[in-house]
Image (cartoon, helix red, strand yellow):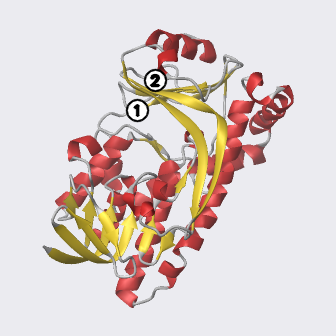
Amino acid sequence: MTEHTTVVVIGAGVAGLTLGNILLRNGIDCVVLEKHSRVHVEQRQRAGTVDSRGVRMFRAWGLDEVLANDTPTDVEAGFFLDGEELPLELGDDDSVFLPQQVLVRNLTDVFLRGGGDLRFEAGGVTLENLDRPVVRYADQVVTADFIAGCDGDRGVSRAAVPAGVLTRYSREYGYAWLSILAEVPANPSGMAIHSRGLAGMIPRGAHASRGYLQCALDDGLEHWPDERVWSELAARFGRPVTPGRIADKRLVPLRNVVHSPMHHARLYLLGDAAHIVPPMSAKGIHLALFDTEVFARAVIRQVRENDASLLDAYSETCLSHVWNYQAFASWITDVMHDAGDPSHAGEFRRRVARAELARQFTSPAASRLFGEFMAGVN
C-alpha cells in the first residue's frame, strides 16, 4: 500500500507531536510514525520543565491546553551551597514544571482529537531517496514532500544521512550523573553543590521526583544501592531527604553534541536527532521546541506561498540558536560541578567557579542574563 503526505514525522515525542499539532492546525497533512506503543511513549520519564519560551510558543499557536497538569506541584526549587540554601532571583519567568510524559499525553490527545494521523508500533522504519522521500515500515509505503526526523539521538533519521554529509561536534565531560526516578515528592527540591559532588532533586509531579548524583564515569549501578543513594543525597543537600521507592535508576554520561548541518535534501533533523545538551542546563525540550517552530513555519511558508526561503535557512537559523544554548549549557555544567568536588577540577577551578556563582547573587546584570537563559528567552 502506497500513500502520499506532505510531511512524515518520525517519532512521537515532544518535537514530533508538537510539529504534528501545528501542521494539523494550519491545514497541512502529515503522518506521525512511532515505533513504540502509546502506553510506552506516555510513560517515558524524562525532562520535567517547559521554560518561558516554550510556554509562550504553545500559547501563540493556540495549544494552551497541552500545558495542563493533573499532578501539579507547589514545591519551589532552591539552590544549596555546602548545605546552605541561597536565594536566586530569576526575574520574569513563567516556566512550568510539567513531566514530559504528561506533556506527551496531552499533545497526543489534542492531535488525535483534531483528526491527526498518529501510528504507534510502526517498527522497522526505513528512509529512502531523500530528494524525493520514501518511508517504509511493515508493509506500508509513504511518500512525502518532507521528512521531519524527531526520533532522537539513536533513531533512524540521522542514520539515513549519507556518510560524510554531517559534521559531529562534541564534548565529553569527565563525570556522569546517577539519575533516579523516585515515587516520593522532591523534598528538598533544587540543586546542591557540595565537596562530595553535585546533587539534585527535581519534582516530577506531586508524588514523584528525579534525583541526581554526580559520580565517576566508571561507576556501575551496583555501586549505588538505594540506601547509599538516599544517604548521599542527604549529605550533599546538608539536610534530611525524604526517601521512597526508586522506580528507575540509570547512569548518564554528560556530553554536548551538535550535528551540522541539521538537514540533508528533504530530511530535516529536530531536537535530539540533531543535538544534545547536558541535563544540568535543562534545555533539551527548549531546543527541540525551537527547532519545531522554525521547521513548522518553514513548511507552512512553502505550502502556502511556494516560498522555500525558510526551509533553505532552517539549519543556519537553528544552529545559531543551538550554539548559543550549547555555550550556556557548557558554562552552567562546568560551574556547578567545578564549584563542588575539588578532586574533579582542582582547587583553582573550584575557587573560580565559586567566584562565578557569587557573581550571580551580587550582580543584577549577571543574574538577569542567567534568568534569560533559564527562561529560554535569550
As helix, strand or loop, the secondary structure at mark 1 comes to loop
In percent of the image, x 32 and y 48: which residue is there?
A: 104
Q: Position of residue 150 (x, y in %)?
A: 39, 59
In percent of the image, x 51 and y 30: which residue is there?
A: 76
- Whether residue 68 appears in this view of the structure is no
Q: Residue furthest right?
A: 348
Where 140 sits versus 226, above or below? below
Q: Residue furthest bottom?
A: 306
Q: Amino acid at mark 1?
A: Arg
Where 362 sits versus 182, above or below? below
In the image, is 272 to the left or to the right of 358?
left
Q: Residue furthest left?
A: 1
In percent of the image, x 64 and y 59: which residue is there?
A: 323
Look at the image and tell me in which quarter the C terminus lies.
bottom right
Q: Which mark is residue 95?
A: none
As helix, strand or loop, the secondary structure at mark 2 comes to loop
Q: Position of residue 134 (x, y in %)?
A: 29, 75
Where 312 sits versus 282, above or below? below
Q: CA distance from mark 2 to mark 1?
A: 8 Å
- Whether residue 80 appears in this view of the structure is yes
Q: Marks 1 and 2: in contact by CB < 8 Å?
A: yes
Look at the image and tell me in which quarter the N terminus lies.
bottom left
- Mark 2 sits on what residue? 186
Where 310 sits versus 86, above or below? below
Q: Position of residue 25 (x, y in %)?
A: 28, 70
Corner quadrant of residue 185: top left
Of residues 82 and 33, the one drawn nearer to the viewer in this rendering: 33
Mark 2 packing: few (<14 Cα in 10 Å), some, or many (20+)? many
- Mark 1 sits on what residue? 204
Q: Amino acid at mark 2?
A: Ala
Of residues 147 and 137, the one drawn nearer to the viewer in this rendering: 137
Q: Position of residue 296 (x, y in %)?
A: 41, 71
